């Protein structure tokens, strides 16, 4: 069974952090809920009194009085329960509302790399299905948990007040229930994790097939698409069937055990009444027996409810696990802590030694994920040491430990539980050789383990001397373990300690290469003790770069440490990519000039403009505007300077006006006036005026009720309305008709005056008037030709050949 990625304690703490602002109201509602539950719990006592002191004693007045009293109690309980349940439901909806907002806002901060590596269906599933699953927990199950526990406690007390003998018989089942509940929880946790993932696969499949419906039908691949969906649906079907099978076995079994206890109480109590005998001096009355039958049903009902709630809790925790993981994803392209600002921006743009490559593997902090390491313990250590020199150095250090500690550690290192391994690692860091035995004994004894044939083992024969009997669960060692590429979860204290040591190394306050073996923990034996030299600053920064570090911890690191980790992450990203798309690219665009970028497919044209808008950060080098590195400027300020017209213009569902003014939160009359001017400028206004509702005309999803050319004109207008200092067109005329192309070309010739313009295009009409043209080569990942149109034609090279593919009869002086 697949377990949660985050500790349950962390997930509960995460949920309760959202309840904290409503703590006062929540406590009041819980009090009312407890009051209502208390009233319900004492109702069997009233029933017993009515039967014994009223009906059996033929006392009509007592029956009448108690019935009225019971009626008022139930009315009060109904009112208090209504107020508490509605109030808690309102609080829970506020929690869900806040989490959903936080998820959406988090996604706005994520870089394009995150969306490249995570299927959109998976992201949609987290923000919809997982939130709905979480809503079930905070929306109603919290109420059930609180009332259920209180009901059980009060029922036990009342049972012993009425009849201790029958109460003891009834509670025989309690330990059995606890054992069954633990077994149920153990089985169901992993299954629910898989259900969330299978639902994500279905969502992804549906989303892709809806978005790509035209492509699917155009290529006649309906059967293939259906087959892929059927595979995801079948997986979900099998997992859900497994869930139902577990439920179908568990709950009837609980019901049967409950029936045995109830029957035992009826048998013993019935014989005691009929024989008019007391058992151990305790008598049983008809009212008490009747109350007990009612109590047992009332007692096991909340118990059964709590067991049913357990499945909802596990499903909700599986959903919370995915939500928490997304919210704790580090923002790969953050705003700088001390941002610079453009003053009187002119729009000069420069690429300085820029190299960049896309990441094609999942961004989970593991390098070369596709290269799975054998899970065989025999092969694992050797493969890990081959792939990671740091691991090899650690094992070399362990070999230098005194016996029998060296043999024990080498034999058991891969089997030791993560918490023990981490504690050993921290304790031994920087130790002198003669300190090692005492430190290993001390740490292992905390967990009732001992190294065989040592004083500790002799003094404590009850301690385990091997981890074979209690093997550690798979905690990431298969992909590199504590020192490998895939880091196991480390405690915040451990991570902070590593960062602190790295800071000392980088600032020159601590030498990590001392001949005496001085290490991260001080003098002596280096990182793992025993004389091993500690890692270089680069190696330590790389270890930290591989770790999944929460944002709040990362932000507390010294700036010099953060910079070192970021540098290593860039190198890791390059290793994870398929190489550079752009490599050591250099060019400069003067203010107010036009640059055209041409090249074959895959040469990096669109990649270059994505770097300008900082959709991705460069791996090496820098992109500068007016001499300022764009990474030193807030993303919003940077993107406010840029007007981007993409090849495939995206149109939002809404009116034409809303799409044109998308960049403005609260458009003023002046901006609306400018919208009409730009629309006239592009020749779009005449088309809009022919529509019944003009600028208020509703556009369907991605503008499916207007033509491609009209969508492109709206995208161009949307960019120009913001009056950008830098205008970028990415194949903006590649999919439009000749008439629309002419409109865009005429508008572009006017719009580029006074602003820096970058054009990616293949059509001669679009690029021939550019001030400068660069030709990118897919093999070189850099500029292979540059100059103006005439110069490039005279070179008789790549540029000319690209044009000849479109214009067969081109002349050199055209």
Image: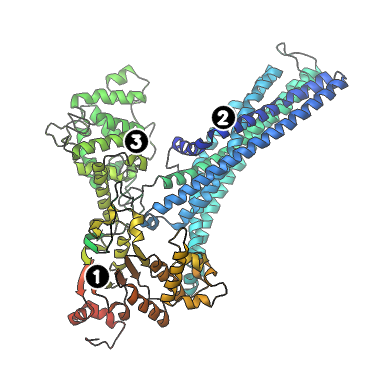
Relative height, residue 578 to residue 163 (above, below)? below
* Relative depth, front residue between 503 and 158: 503
Give the mark nearest the N terminus, 1 or 2: 2
Relative height, residue 344 to residue 496 (above, below)? below
Give the mark nearest the N terminus, 3 or 2: 2
Q: Position of residue 129 (x, y in %)?
A: 53, 51
For the question of whether residue 417 can be seen, the reply is no
Marks 1/2: CA–CA distance: 69 Å
Question: Total marks drawn?
Answer: 3
Left or right of 131: which side holds 414? left
Marks 1/3: CA–CA distance: 46 Å
Reading the image, the residue beneath label 1 is 776
Reading the image, the residue beneath label 3 is 492
Which label was assigned to residue 178? 2
User: In terms of image quadrants, where is residue 86?
Assistant: top right
Q: Position of residue 577 (x, y in %)?
A: 29, 57
Secondary structure of the residue carrying numbered label 1: strand
Which label was assigned to residue 61? none
């Amino acid at each position: 069974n697949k377990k949660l990625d985050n500790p349950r304690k962390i997930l509960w703490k995460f949920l309760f952090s959202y309840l904290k602002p409503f703590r006062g109201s929540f406590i009041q509602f819980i009090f009312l809920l407890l009051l209502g539950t208390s009233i319900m719990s004492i109702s069997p006592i009233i029933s017993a009194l009515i039967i014994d002191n009223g009906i059996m004693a033929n006392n009509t007045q007592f029956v009448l009085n108690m019935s009225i009293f019971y009626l008022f109690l139930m009315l009060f309980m109904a009112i208090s329960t209504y107020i508490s349940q509605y109030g808690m439901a309102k609080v829970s909806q506020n929690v869900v509302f806040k989490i959903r907002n936080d998820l959406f806002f988090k996604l706005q901060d994520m870089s394009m790399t995150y969306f490249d590596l995570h299927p959109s269906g998976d992201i949609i599933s987290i923000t919809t299905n997982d939130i709905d699953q979480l809503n079930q927990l905070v929306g109603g199950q919290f109420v059930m948990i609180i009332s259920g526990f209180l009901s059980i406690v009060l029922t036990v007390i009342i049972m012993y007040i009425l009849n201790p003998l029958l109460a003891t018989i009834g509670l025989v089942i309690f330990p059995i229930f606890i054992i069954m509940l633990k077994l149920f929880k153990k089985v169901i946790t992993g299954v629910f994790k898989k259900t969330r993932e299978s639902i994500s696969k279905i969502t992804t499949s549906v989303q892709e097939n809806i978005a790509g419906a035209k492509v699917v039908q155009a290529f006649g691949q309906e059967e293939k698409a259906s087959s892929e969906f059927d595979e995801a649906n079948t997986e979900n079907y099998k997992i859900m069937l497994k869930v139902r099978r577990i439920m179908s076995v568990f709950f009837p079994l609980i019901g049967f055990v409950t029936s045995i206890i109830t029957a035992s109480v009826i048998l013993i109590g019935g014989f005691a009444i009929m024989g008019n005998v007391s058992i151990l001096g305790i008598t049983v009355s008809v009212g008490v027996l009747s109350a007990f039958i009612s109590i047992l049903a009332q007692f096991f009902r909340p118990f059964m409810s709590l067991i049913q709630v357990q499945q909802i809790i596990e499903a909700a925790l599986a959903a919370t696990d995915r939500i928490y993981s997304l919210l704790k994803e580090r923002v790969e392209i953050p705003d700088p802590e001390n941002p610079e600002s453009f003053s009187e921006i002119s729009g000069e743009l420069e690429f300085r030694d820029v190299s960049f490559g896309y990441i094609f593997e999942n961004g989970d902090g593991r390098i070369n994920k596709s290269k799975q390491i054998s899970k065989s313990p025999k092969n694992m250590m050797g493969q890990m040491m081959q792939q990671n020199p740091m691991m090899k150095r650690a094992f070399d250090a362990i070999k230098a430990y005194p016996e029998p500690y060296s043999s024990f550690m080498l034999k058991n290192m891969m089997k030791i539980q993560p918490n023990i391994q981490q504690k050993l690692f921290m304790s031994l860091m920087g130790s002198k050789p003669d300190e090692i035995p005492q430190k290993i004994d001390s740490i292992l004894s905390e967990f009732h383990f001992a190294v065989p044939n040592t004083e500790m083992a002799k003094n404590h024969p009850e301690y385990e001397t091997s981890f074979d009997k209690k093997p550690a669960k798979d905690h990431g060692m298969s992909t590199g373990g504590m020192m490998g590429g895939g880091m196991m979860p480390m405690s915040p204290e451990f991570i902070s300690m590593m960062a602190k040591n790295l800071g000392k190394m980088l600032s020159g306050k601590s030498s990590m290469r001392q001949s005496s073996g001085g290490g991260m923990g001080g003098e002596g034996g280096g990182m793992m003790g025993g004389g091993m030299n500690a890692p270089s600053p680069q190696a330590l920064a790389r270890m930290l770069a591989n770790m999944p570090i929460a944002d709040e911890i990362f932000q507390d690191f010294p700036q010099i440490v953060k910079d070192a980790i970021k540098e290593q992450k860039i190198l890791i990203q390059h290793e994870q990519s398929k190489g550079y798309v752009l490599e050591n690219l250099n060019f400069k665009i003067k203010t107010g000039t036009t640059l055209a970028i041409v090249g074959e497919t895959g040469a990096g044209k669109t990649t270059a403009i994505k770097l300008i808008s900082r959709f991705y950060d460069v791996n090496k080098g820098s992109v500068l505007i007016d001499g300022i590195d764009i990474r030193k400027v807030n993303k919003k300020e940077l993107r406010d300077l840029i007007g981007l017209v993409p090849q495939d213009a995206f149109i939002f569902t809404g009116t034409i006006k809303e799409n044109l003014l998308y960049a403005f939160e609260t458009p003023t009359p002046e901006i609306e006036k400018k919208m009409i001017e730009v629309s006239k400028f592009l020749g779009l206004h005449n088309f809009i005026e022919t529509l019944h509702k003009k600028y208020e005309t509703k556009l369907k999803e991605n503008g499916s009720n207007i033509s491609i050319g009209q969508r492109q004109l709206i995208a161009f207008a949307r960019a120009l309305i913001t009056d950008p200092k830098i205008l970028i067109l990415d194949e903006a005329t590649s999919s439009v008709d000749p008439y629309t192309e002419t409109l865009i070309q005429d508008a572009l010739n006017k719009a580029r005056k006074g602003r820096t313009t970058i054009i990616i295009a293949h059509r001669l009409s679009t690029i021939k008037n550019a001030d400068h043209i660069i030709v990118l080569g897919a093999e070189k990942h850099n500029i292979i030709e540059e100059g103006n149109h005439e110069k490039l034609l005279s070179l008789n090279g790549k540029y000319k050949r690209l044009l000849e593919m479109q214009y067969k009869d081109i002349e050199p002086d055209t």
